Image (cartoon, rainbow, N blue to C red):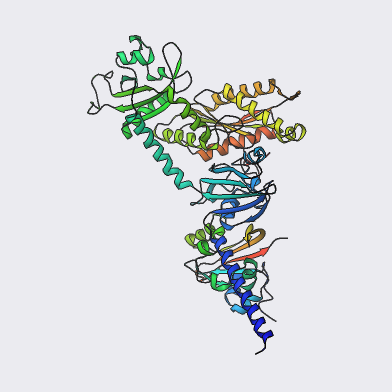
Amino acid sequence: MSAAVDLRAFAEDANAHLAAEHEALMQFLYLSPVGLVQTDTGGEILMINPISAQLLMPLAHDGNLVNLFEALEGVAPELRHLCAAFTRPNGMVCDGLQIHLNYPNYAGGGALRPRRSPQVLSLSLLKLDDTRLMAVLSDVSEQVRRERQLRQNDAWLNALLTSITDYALVGLDREGRVCEWNETIGRVTGHGEALVGSSYSVFYPADAITDEQVHDRLREADQNGWNLDEGARVRADGSQFWASAMISPIPDRDLEPVDPDAPAYCMVVRDISDKREAIETRRKSAFCDHLTGVANRRAFFDAAELELQRNRRAPRPIALVLVDADHFKSINDRHGHPAGDAVLRQLGLVLTATFRQVDVVARIGGEEFAVLLPSSTLAGAAVVAERLRQVVQAQAVAFEGASIGVTVSAGVAASDGVDLDLETLMKRADRALYAAKAGGRNRVESWTPDLSEPADRPAGAPR
Amino acid sequence: MNTATALSFTTPALLEQLAQLSADQLDELDFGVIGFDADTNVCRYNRTESEAAGLTGPRVLDQPLFTNVAPCLNNFLVGQRFEDAEDGNTSLDDTIDYVLTLRMRPIKVKLRLLAEPGSAVRYVLVQRRL
């Protein structure tokens, strides 16, 4: 056998070996249980493995996966901004950012919605250099659900075990009215004996709790043995403090008491103002939209789910308003993205000022906001939405010397306590919003049964 | 006339005709063919598909399609459609626009999903979109 033949055989062997190795590597990436995507700085996809495609495909409106930012636009509108704001030559742009999918931007919703569709994605973005980004995507729905449970347990333990400097011990009757005054109430809240007979909602800032929610907490205490709520409270003199309040049913109480004013629950209110900053920071980073400061999608869907759960137990009206900035794209085009951001910030401010404190105001898409109004009717919500529309129209946004006129369109839908499905509610509000847009914009429309389905436009898609 | 080359991605009633092709004949088709059995294990895999994906038969055959071969099809656009057809005992013949990650590049394709009650093999057919 000649040396040449030997060499050729050797080269063929080496080639075969390389090919096999290449194939093994390929399959390694095909089967990776986490998503890997490489994009250019504008999000254009350069390389992508199958699990990423599986997670992203249902979000891509046109069925094309070309740009990562575009695919995630509806559920994580802040991505472009995060990357643009990241000035270091390389490094982590975001690490484990949680992206809540849910309705409405999960294209193909309704009957087509998969049983196993993810609810929450985790996204980490690594800037490799001036031209490339690497993204890691995974479905963390189950972990998030478990964490939520753990957080509740933590809060419960904190309430029990954290060293208590001062607390008010308040007896409540079946309806949540204060039964008796005692010194601890005086010390923590400044209230005198005249407090007796008032609902415990008197401790909340105006507008921060509805009558129905007052009862929700009592029902939850009945069912779980306790109800815990952390948040702002007011003293008799109007000053605010940060409190942790736990309500528990009094054991062995008479279920059908002869005296309806007898204590049925015990509420412990602790002033935890000194911890407030830490709690608020934690809450903000996880639940706030970075640009506008209103709630983000995650907080919105959390709150909406909770409210609807309660609603199922004790039906009452609930309303939803979807608000969308008119001609937002042309504002961006004419004045630039920073001006667009200023407009969104202003909208966030006006929304927060216009709606009640108990309402959940959230940014759920690029220029789309949602407001959930517990215990509100369709007509009531429409009135507030109309007020919002007027205020927005009247206040031009000042940005770098320019005065930018902005209007909004809004769609209102409500549930009368029978139809309690968030998806339906979102869909109806979206149809009403679509009608407002079609009717010339700068309008508020309420859902009616004859509003037909807009053709082929997924909810939340850019208008 | 060669049976295989007469078949195209859009040929009507394709499922029963594919079932009659030998492995060699499947290899002659200009679109990708992935066939899987009742347990979702891949039982047919043609050359076009193999070359596009960069995987050879032995790595794919007898592997569960939706978990070990093409997890990107395990969603409501594809996997769910087969499940629904199976649960409802109905036939499935639908073509959808899709993006596959062939060799880690996003490639626009058309997928044709084929299933028939009583048929042992179900198919995902793949054709590139231009």
**Seen in the image, is A259 located left or right of residue B52?**
left
Residue A226 falls in image quadrant: top left
Residue A299 image offset from top left, x and y in percent: 51, 35
In the rendering, at what x and y percent does residue A27 appear?
56, 64
Looking at this rendering, what residue extends furthest in the bottom direction? A1
Indicate the position of residue A362 as horizontal and vertical percent values.
56, 32
Judged left or right of residue A223, residue A72 is: right
Q: Quadrant of the N terminus of chain A?
A: bottom right
Q: Is residue A392 visible?
A: yes
Residue lying farthest front? Answer: A3
Q: Total number of numbered labels?
A: 0
Looking at the picture, tell me which residue is in the foreground, A164 or A364.
A164
Q: Quadrant of the C terminus of chain A?
A: top right
Q: Is residue A283 left or right of residue A186?
A: right
- Tell me the residue at 69%/76% (across/down): B5
Foreground residue among A14 and B130: A14
Residue that appears at 41% across and 12% down = A236
Tell me the quarter of the picture where residue B9 sits: bottom right
On screen, residue A289 above or below B78: above
Q: Height in image: A458 above or below A304?
A: below
Would residue A415 be seen by someone viewing this image from the given angle?
no
